[in-house]
Image: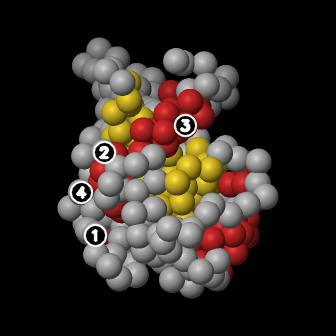
Amino acid sequence: MKFVDSARIVVKAGDGGNGCVSFRREKYVPKGGPDGGDGGRGGHVYLRANSQLATLLDFRYKKNYEALRGVHGQGSKKAGKTGKDIVINVPCGTLVKNSVSGEVICDLVEDGEEFLLARGGDGGRGNPHFTTSTRQAPRYAEPGGKGEELKVDLELKLMADVGLVGFPNAGKSTLISVLSAARPKIADYPFTTLVPNLGIVQYGEYKSFVMADIPGIIEGAAEGKGLGIQFLRHIERTKVLAVLVSGDGEDLVGEYRLLLGEMERFDPALLQKPRIIVVTKMDVVDEAFSLPDFEDDVPLIPVSSITRSGLEELRNALWNTINPSIP
């Protein structure tokens, strides 16, 4: 399945049905009064979060959504039927913005959560509503109201407990593959990961948490270089960040500071999240290697996805940070 995390769609709620101009015409009632029915309301457009969806791919092919209009009123005070509502299903974690103003309209997080995106037009009133003491036979009825129409941007932000952040080839994909059942593409060249990957990490017998691996960040990612800016939003919802630096790098502290800088430029709130420094590829460092002083009061855990060293300590640290009150 192709991963798509942004789309633009146009929605149009149904117009209301027109009210009816009608008068009673019965054999023994030669001057019957007005009996025009009201028009039906136009259909609403709803958005609904659906946990069975994982991408916005469908919206690349279908971009316009329109609800049905209300039925016009009829004689004998018969009201028109309400136009059928439509429900647009989106993945959990979808942020919805007005395409024109950029204003956030809603943020659908929980499975089954609904939002009324466009309201259908009201049905017009039939001519009985316009009788007065001096006007007993009004030949006027109200037209139906227009349904709301708007253009919106959909942005998917993955729902994960842990976000893996690091440079290309820092070992993020390998780490998520050994901690979970996720099977991302792994190779020894930059940008092997082109889309985010989610993995469920088992902890103990009955507990688990969700980990997200995003494409590697490079210097200037917050300004759009590389793939980072396209996917940094997927770590905005995470509870904890695991910042990976490769043990075979030349300047581990410098890489770590650069990563923090890119996250801060993208969204300063990212640096307020709990984080853990993970030094990867400990199986390839030479014997003289020693962990540097990152001068940051956060946990520091060296690991090797190949030899599995440090993985249990990392799993425990992540769980305790996500769920500090659950043993």
Query: Residue at image x 49%, y 34%?
Result: 316
* Crowd rating for badge 3 (residues with CA inside 10 Å; few <14, some 14–19, many 20+): some
State the CA–CA distance, disc 4 to disc 3. 23 Å
* Front position in the image: 258 or 146: 258
Q: Where is residue 191 in the image (x, y as percent from the top left)?
A: 39, 78
Which residue bears the numbered disc 2? 180
Report the front residue among 290 and 223: 290
What amino acid is labelled 4 in the image?
Arg
Looking at marks 4 and 3 on the same chain, the residue that comes earlier in the sequence is marked by 4
Picture residue at 61% right of the left edge, 54% below the top: 277
Q: Give the SS element for disc 3.
A: helix
Looking at the picture, does residue 110 appear above or below residue 273? above
Q: Which amino acid does label 2 sit on?
A: Ser
Residue named by callout 1: 186
Can residue 312 be spotted in the picture?
Answer: yes
Q: How many labels does the image show?
A: 4
Circle on res. 317: 3
